[in-house]
Amino acid sequence: MKKTVAVVLALLMVFTLFAGCGGKDDGGDYAGTIKIGVFEPASGDNGAGGKQETLGVQYANYETPTVEINGEVYKVELVTADNESDPSKGITAAEQLASSGVSIVLGTYGSAVAIAAGPTFDSKGIPAIGITCTNPQVTEAANYFRICFLDPFQGTVLANYAYENGMRKAYCLSKMGDDYSVGLVNYFSEAFKKLGGSVVEEQFEQGNSDFAAYVANAKKNGCDVFFSPVSTEAAALIINQADAQKLGMPILASDTWDSNVITGAAKGTGLDIIVTTFYQEGGSPEFDKGIKEWIEGDKTNLENNGGNTELAAVTAMGYDAYYVALEAIKKAGSADPGEILKVLPSVTYEGVCGKVVFKDSGDADRSEAVVKKCNTEEGTWEYLGTQTVQ
Amino acid sequence: MNFFVDNLPYILAGISVGGQYALIAIGYTMVYGILRLINFAHGDMFMMAGLVMVYLAADLPMQIAIPVVIVFTVVLGCMIEKVAYKPLRSAPRMSIMISAIGVSYLLQNAALYLTGGLAKTYPAIPWLAKTVEIFGAHTKMVTIVTPILTLVLVIGLVLLIKFTKIGMAMRAVSRDFETSQLMGIDINRVITVTFIIGSFLAAVGSVLYFTNYTAVLPTSGSMPGLKAFVAAVFGGIGSIPGAVIGAFIIGICENIIKGLGWTTFSNAFTFVLLIIILMVKPTGLFGEKNIDKV
Amino acid sequence: MNKEISISKKQKTILSLFTCLVFLALVYVGDMLTPPTSSWGMLFTVLEKGSIYALVAVSMNLLNGFTGLFSLGQAGFMLIGGYTYAIFSIPAASRDSVYQYFDGGLIKFSIPEIFSNALGGVLGELGYSLGEFIGMFVPMIMAGLITAGLAFLIGIPVLRLKSDYLAIATLGFAEILRAFFQWKALGPITNGSNILRSFSTYSSPLFPIIISGLCIGFIVLLINSSYGRAFKAIRDDEIAAEAMGVNLFKHKQWSFVISSFFAGIGGALLAMFSSSITTTPFTSNLTYEILLIVVIGGIGSVTGSILGSFLFVACSEWWLRGLDSGAFLGLSFGFMRPGFRKVVFAVVIMIIVLFYSKGIMGTREFSWEGFLTFLKNLPGRLINFFKAFPKRLADFFRTLPAKIAGLPARMKNSLKKLKTNTKHGKEAR
C-alpha cells in the first residue's frame, strides 16, 4: 500500500516535469505567438492591488489579443507568475517568466519586489515595464522602465496639498519592512517640513491588525492630518479604527488607497479621506464602460476586483502598460527582447491615464497627480482636481 | 486625571485585546496541560473561524451565522485532533509538534486559496460594532463587552473543571497522563472535551477580535496565536486564571508601549517578556511546580 | 536475490570525487549552453536555491535531528547572516542611493571592493574581478561568525530550556531580531525597513553549489567525529549521556553555535541569490518551511535533508506552478487557481508527516554500497516487476469486487485497531 502511494506520487512528480514545457497553439491563423509576462502578486500583502492591476492588463489583452509585426498578425499570450509580494519568491517568479520565453514583462505592484527582480531581468536581457511601482530605485536596473510617477514627486504633491489646505502637523504611519510606505513617508515629511509643517512618524509591524493605539497617538499628539500610504489591507483596518475612535482629522494617502477596498470600508463612516492617484473614473468613458462590462461578465474577474465594478487607478495603469508594450513590439518589429529593449526608450503612447514618454532614466515624464476624495455616503471616489509641483 | 484621560484609549484597547488573547490562550493552556503539545494550529483555527464567518454572514442572518461558526470551529478543532494528533499519540513529542506546524501550514494555505490572498472584511455585528463614548474616549461596544464576556466564560469554565466529573478527569489527566489512564479515565474523551472547549472559546474570541479589527487574512491568526501562547506561559501553563491574567497583562502592556512611541517593538516586547519569564520563573505566575517532566 | 556489493575506501573516495566533478562540469557546461530565456533556465535556479536551502536544512538537522534540540530560530539566524553579508559588500559608490534615507549609511566601505582594488592595482583587469571574488568570502565568513557569536549569547539562557519551551523561545528571539533590523534608529547600518541591494553576488550557479557542498561536507565530518557521537548521545538520552561524561551544556552550545554559523552562511547565500535583502521573508514561516524540508528528508539524515530541499524547491517553485495557472499535466479545472499549488503541497506534507514520519531517508545516509547494490539489482527487479505485471493486474481486477464489498468491514477493523493501539500504546512523551 505504502509503496503504491509512493510510486503514484513519484510518477506525478515526473509528469509535472513535462507539464511546464510545450506551449499550446490554438490553431488560429496567426504567424506565431508573442508572450508578455505579467509579474504581479496574487497573494501576500499586495495581493489585492496586484490582482486589480492584472485585471487592467487582462482586459487590454481581451480587447486587443493580437499584434501586427511587418504585416503579419501574431497572437499575444499573457504569462502570469505570482511573486507573492515577497522579494525572494519574486526572483524565482521572474526566472519562471524568463524561462517561459516572454518578450517583455509588465509589473509589479509593490516596489520592493520590482527592485529585487530588476537584476534578474537585466541578466536575462528582458525589458520590464513597471506599472505602479513608484520607488525611485526601481529604474536603477538597466532594463526597468515605468509609466507611473515617482515617490519623491508624489510625496511632495501630498505635502503641498496638505500645507495649502491649512494642515500644519502631520501624523505619518508607515509599515515596517515595506519600502513603499516608508519611502513615501520620508519624502512627504521632508517636503512638509520644508514648507514649515511638523511631523510625527510612527511605524507598525508586519501582520499587525490592532490600530487602536496608532489612531489614539495621532489624536494625543494633536495632529491636523493622518498620513498613511500603506497597503489596502492595513488601510481598511485604519479606517475602521479611525471611525470607532472618531479621529476628527482628514486622512491623506497615496495611490494604493485608490481602491474599492477603501471606499467599501469608508462607506457610512463620515471620514475625510483624500488620495493622490493616476486616474479618475470618467477620464475615458469608453474604457470605463468596456472594462466594467468585462469585469461584470466573469465571476473570477469580479472577485479579483473586490466584488464590484468600481475601478481602481492601478487597473487603468495596467491597461495602459499593455498598450505601451504592444507599441514597443510594433516599433521593434520583432518579438526579440533585445530588439524591444532597444526601441523602448523612444516609445510614446497616449493612454487613458495620460501620455507616456520615457525619460533617460527610464521613468515616465509625469508632472501631475489626480486628487480624489472619498464620498463616504455612496462609497465612491470624487474628483477634486489635479495637483502639481511648482 | 489628565494622565488617565490621555491614556484611556490605550488601556481600553489593551483590555479588549487582552480579553481576546485570553480566550485563545485558554485553548493553548488546556491542550498543553493535557497533551504537552503547543497546538500551533490553534491560532489558525481562530483565523478560520473568522473566515467562515465572513462567508456565512453574506447569506445568513447574524443570529444563525454566529452559532454555525462556533459549531464549525468546534468540529474543525476535533477533526484536527483526530486526524493529526491522535495517530501520533505514542510518537515522540517532536513529531506531534511538527504535525501541529504542518496543520498550521495547511490551514494557512487553504485560507490563502479560498480568499485568493485578499483581505476579507469582517461583517459588522450591529450591536457590537457600535461606537460608544466612555470618559471622552470613543471606542467600539465590543471593547466593553469583551472583558465582561471573558470573565463570565472563564468563571464558567473554572466551575466546570472544579465541580463536574469530566472536569475532575481533566485535572487528573493533566497531573499525570499515565496514571489517570490506569485509573480507568477515558483519555480520548477527555482530550476531545478539551479540544471542544478550546475551539469554542477560540470561536468566541474570533467573533470579538475581528469585530474590533475587521480584516481577515490567512496570516491573521499567527501573531495573536503566538501572543496568546506567550500569555499562557506567562500565567503558568496549565493554569486557566493564569492564562487570563497573562493575556490581559500582555494586551495592556502592548498598547501602552505603542502609546509611548515604541511601536517598532510592540511585538518584540511580547517575546522579551516570554524569555524573561522562562529564565526567571519557568513555571509562570500560577504554574504548578515541576510541570516539565522530561 | 539482493547481492551486496562491497568496495574499498579508496575506491569510494575516487568514485565520490569523480561524481562531484562530473556533476559540477555538467552544471557549468549546461549553464553556459543554456540561453537565458530557455525553459531549462529554471533548472539552474532550482539548483541554486535548492543548494542554499540544503545547507540551511542540514544545519537545522544538526540541531533538531542529531542533537535533539527543537529550535525554531533558523530564520532569525539567516537574517543576521544575510544582512551582515549585504552591509559589508555594497560598493561605496552605490551606498548613497541604497541608503538614500540615511545619508549613505554609517559604513562607507565594501570589503569585496577593497580586495578588488588591492589586487587590481597589481594584476590589472583580471585582478579586479579576482579580488572581488576573493573579497566576497570575507563578509561571508563574517556573516557566519557574527551569527555564531549572537547564537552563543542567545544560547546561554535559552539552551537551559526543555523541548517546546526551547522552540518557542528561539522563535521569539527570531522575531525580536527582525524588529531590531527594522528599527529606524539602526537605519544607518541596516537601512531600516528599506531594501539592501547592489552588493556583490555570484554569477555562476556553481558558486552556491560548491559553497553549500563544502559546508555540508564539514557538517558531515563533524557528525562523524567524537563531537557528533556526543550530540547523538544527548539526543538519545540526556541523562545517560551526562552519566557517560558528556558535558551537556557545552555540547548543546557547540551544536547551537555551529548550526547558526552555517545558517548565517546560508543567509548570506540567499541574499546573493535574491541580489537584495529585506527583513520581510525571514518570518517564522521560513523556519517552518525549512523544518518541513528536514521532516520530508528524514530527521537525522543529511542526505535526506539535501534531497528534501531540492524536491521542495523544485515542487514549490517550478513543477507545481502549473496547478496555479490552471494547466497541469494537460488537466485543467476551475478549481485550479492561484494558491491551489500550496494547498496540494501542504496536503502532501501532512501525508508525509502522518504516514511516512521517517521521511525519504529516515536516519539512513547515502552510501556507495547501497547505491550500487540498488543499481545492480534494479534491472532484475524491473524485469520481475514487468513479468509479473500482467498477472498482478489480472489479479487486481479479479479481486476488486470482493475488495470493494469487504471495504466497510475492513475500515471498521482498522478503526478498532487504531483505537486499541492508541489506548495501549506506550507513552513516550
Image (cartoon, coloured by chain):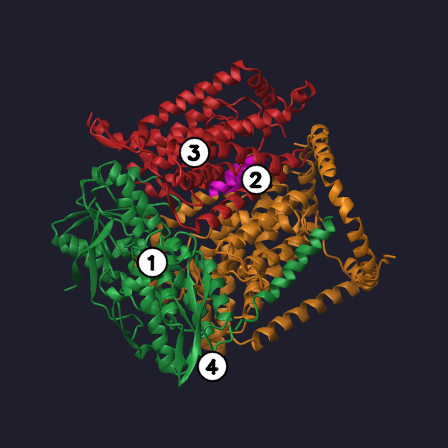
Chain colours: A green, B red, C orange
Query: Do labels 2 and 1 touch, CB within 8 Å?
Result: no
Tag 3: amino acid: Leu
Residue for point 83% across, 63% down: C383
Are labels 2 and 1 on one chain? no
Tag 3 residue: B273
Mark 3, other Cα within 10 Å: few <14 / some 14–19 / many ≥20: some
> Tag 3 or tag 2, which sits nearer the N-term?
2
Mark 2, other Cα within 10 Å: few <14 / some 14–19 / many ≥20: many
Tag 2: amino acid: Ala
Chain ID at mark 2: B
Q: Is residue C357 visible?
A: no
Alpha-carbon span between mark 4 and mark 2: 54 Å
Q: Is residue A132 left or right of residue C205?
A: left
Tag 4 residue: A31
Whether B198 is drawn above or below B114: the answer is: above
For the record, the magenta segment spans: C154-173
Secondary structure at numbered mark 3: helix
Q: Of the residues tagged 1 and 4, which is closer to the observer?
A: 4
Tag 1 residue: C105
Q: Of the residues tagged 2 and 3, which is closer to the observer?
A: 2
Alpha-carbon span between mark 4 and mark 3: 67 Å
The label shown at residue B100 is 2
Secondary structure at numbered mark 1: loop
Residue C158 among magenta residues:
yes
Q: Quadrant of residue C328?
A: bottom right
Residue for point 44% across, 30% down: B67
Residue B220 among magenta residues:
no
Q: Of the residues tagged 3 and 1, which is closer to the observer?
A: 3
Tag 4: amino acid: Ala
Whether B56 is drawn above or below B287: the answer is: below
Q: Is residue B227 visible?
A: yes
SS majority, magenta: helix
